[in-house]
Structure formats: C-alpha cells, structure tokens
Image: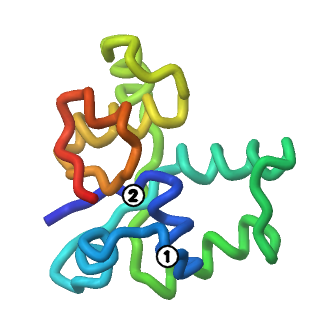
Amino acid sequence: MRYLLDTHAFLWFVLDDKRISTKAKSIIKDSKNEIYFSAASAWEMSIKIRLGRLTIEEELEPFIVKQLAENIFSTLPITIFHSFYTSKLPDIHKNPFDRMIIAQSQLENMSLISKDKDIKKYKVQIVW
C-alpha cells in the first residue's frame, strides 16, 4: 500500500516521539508499504522553524534528506493539479499545508497517516 505522512507523523516517527500510534509506527516500518513525504511538509516545517514554532537539533534540509534516505521514504512533489484541487475541498480545514496534503492524498489515491481530527472530516482514508 501507499501512504502519505502528515507532517506531525513524519516528525513523531523519525524523532521516536511517544505520541505516534503503534499502528502508524507499524505501517511506516513495514517494508511492503510505500511511504511518501510531501513537499508541503518540508515547506510547513521551514515556515514553522522560521517563526520559532518548531525546533529541531539539525539544519532542516540535511535533517529531512537524511531521514528520507534512512527510512526509505519517497518524496511527493506539489503539482499544479494538487494546487488547483485545494480550491475544490470543503472549507473545513483552514491550514494550507494540511489542505495540500489532503488534496495530494485524494488525487494520488494514498491513505494518509495523521492524527488530525479535522482531516478525518474529508473524504480521505486516514490511518492512525
């Protein structure tokens, strides 16, 4: 199966944070699954670090690149079609990064690994 990581799921997994669910951790670790990391998550993390709302021990770019390689995560770029699709989503979630990840999940037919309760209100397969 193919899964897309929400930003917090990526961080909680790679930082071995106890907030990640056992089920999510198991799915991510299963080598039969393809795990994707969205460019939207890198963008979100960049902005949060700049605003002082996220702190990591390393510089962001080498940290993400290292984690993608170590965990064999694939990257999912943002396409123009993903961007257009965000305008078709109901206005449940106001966070633009989450809206992009929802659009990507729907258009790419991927289950989304996320704890976000608002995302569950969209027509997207959530795993947590």
Q: Front-most of 29 and 119?
A: 119
Check disc 2: other Cα within 10 Å, few if <14, some if 14-19, many if 20+. Answer: many
Q: Which one is earlier in the sequence, the residue at label 2 or at label 1?
A: 2
Quadrant of image for the C terminus? bottom left
Left or right: 12 in relation to 108: right
Left or right: 18 in relation to 1: right
- Which residue is found at the position 46% from the left and 48% from the top? 77
**Residue 19, horizontal then vertical, whole percent:** 48, 68
Instruction: Tell me the amino acid under the disc marked 1.
Output: Lys
Does the CB distance between marks 2 and 1 fall below 8 Å?
no
Label 1 SS: loop
Residue that badge 1 annotates: 18
Q: Front-most of 107 and 101?
A: 101
Left or right: 57 in relation to 33: right
Quadrant of image for the N terminus? bottom left
- Image quadrant of residue 79? top left
- Which residue is found at the position 21% from the left and 51% from the top? 111
- Which residue is found at the position 38% from the left and 30% from the top? 82
Residue that badge 2 annotates: 5
Q: In whole angstroms, how far apart are the C-alphas of marks 2 and 1? A: 17 Å
**Residue 5, horizontal then vertical, whole percent:** 39, 58
**Residue 16, horizontal then vertical, whole percent:** 53, 81
- Which residue is found at the position 61% from the left and 81% from the top? 66
Label 2 vs label 1, nearer the camera = 1
**Residue 64, horizontal then vertical, whole percent:** 62, 70
Above or below: residue 67 compared with residue 4: below
Residue 81, numbered circle: none
- The residue furthest front is 18
